[in-house]
């Protein structure tokens, strides 16, 4: 179509998503940067910005779209109905948060010296990949443990995103992405309160 | 001159199923879709040309093409 939108700087944020995963291979401590894409969307929606992050600044969503659409890796089929339901979306969010809490607890155990540092990245909460080629001895073991845990979360969600990108539509992940579900939930509560008060 | 009335299709978002991901906004060639407060997407019927691109791209497949406006077509 002739009237294509001009590309802006924030159309290239998929690059950030790729860079994040690469940096984590070189040094797991970069995984800490991922806290930004946890906190920024929440801060935005809590301060009334809705899903501005999803809509304009999320590199993950852009990357999935790029791979599915431009690289034609997606089957472009509708998702099964159950995956689009509130039960599944909030169920997945709960599961995700429980596993996140579990990861924080493990970090705490290492932090307090009860457990020693475990240099593995866990995929899909099950498969353990040895990741011990980086020297992290210059930071406390707890700090490194959190990085391993957080990188596991990011890599796992990327893989789930890629699988549903291939099976269904490019941005299928955005339907059940925990960040998206949280920001949508916050925005919905704010919106409902607003119309109630009018 | 023979005048025929034709129904033109417009995109319609099923709001309570929308997660406001913004995919439709990005792909619409006419800039006809807006996300309202991060809750749902809304189509501006005056801007929508019924191209169906958004309906194909919506990951939740919840954009329907609905016959909305009557357009008068000249048939010579
Ligand atoms: S739903 Fe998740 S992956 Fe999709 S744009 Fe929002 S934060 Fe990014
Ligand atoms: S693409 Fe679909 S789910 Fe996403 S904002 Fe548009 S209508 Fe809603
Ligand atoms: S049908 Fe085409 S013009 Fe209408 S809202 Fe969808 S993408 Fe935009």
Image (cartoon, grey):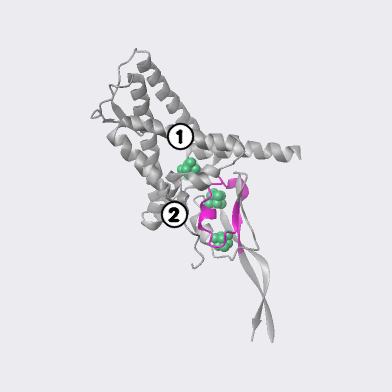
Range of the magenta residues?
A: B10-34
Instruction: Give the answer, above or below, for where A105 lies relative to A45.
Output: above
Circle on res. A36: 1
Q: Is residue A153 left or right of residue B22?
A: left
Name the image quarter holding residue A48: top right
Residue A181, image x, y percentages: 53, 38
**Farthest residue in the right direction?**
A198
Q: Nearer the viewer, mark 2 or mark 1?
A: 1
Task: Check the picture and name the quadrant holding the C terminus of chain A.
Answer: top right
Whether residue B31 appears in this view of the structure is yes
Q: Residues within 10 Å of mark 2 (few under 14, many from 20)?
A: some
Q: Position of residue A2 (x, y in %)?
A: 49, 68
In the image, what residue occupies the spot 41% across and 20% down? A105
Identify the residue at horizontal 47%, vertical 40% (top origin).
A177
Q: Percent from the top left, x then y, of residue B76? A: 64, 87
- Front-most of A194 and A31? A31
What residue would you read off at disc 2? A77
Whether residue A87 is visible, yes or no, is no
Marks 2 and 1, how far apart in space? 32 Å
Determine the residue located farthest toward the left in the rendered image: A133
């Amino acid at each position: 179509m002739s009237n294509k939108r001009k590309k802006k700087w924030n159309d290239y944020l998929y690059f950030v998503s790729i860079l994040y995963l690469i940096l984590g291979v070189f040094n797991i401590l970069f995984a800490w940067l991922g806290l930004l894409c946890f906190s920024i969307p929440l801060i935005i929606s809590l301060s009334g910005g809705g899903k501005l992050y999803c809509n304009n600044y999320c590199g993950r969503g852009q990357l999935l779209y790029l791979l599915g659409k431009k690289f034609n890796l997606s089957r472009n089929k509708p998702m099964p109905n159950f995956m689009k339901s509130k039960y599944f979306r909030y169920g997945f969010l709960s599961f995700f948060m429980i596993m996140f809490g579990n990861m924080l607890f493990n970090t705490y155990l290492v932090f307090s010296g009860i457990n020693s540092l475990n240099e593995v990245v866990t995929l899909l909460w099950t498969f353990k990949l040895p990741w011990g080629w980086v020297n992290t001895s210059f930071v406390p073991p707890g700090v490194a443990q959190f990085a391993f845990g957080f990188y596991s979360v990011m890599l796992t969600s990327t893989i789930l995103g890629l699988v549903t990108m291939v099976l269904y539509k490019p941005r299928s992940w955005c339907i059940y992405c925990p960040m998206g579900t949280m920001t949508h939930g916050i925005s919905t509560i704010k919106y409902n309160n607003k119309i109630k008060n009018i | 001159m023979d005048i025929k009335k034709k129904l033109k299709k417009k995109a319609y978002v099923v709001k309570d199923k929308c997660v406001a991901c913004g995919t439709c906004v990005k792909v619409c060639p006419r800039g006809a879709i807006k996300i309202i407060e991060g809750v749902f997407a809304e189509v501006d019927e005056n801007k929508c040309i019924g191209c169906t691109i958004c309906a194909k791209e919506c990951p939740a497949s919840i954009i329907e093409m609905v016959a909305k406006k009557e357009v008068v077509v000249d048939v010579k």
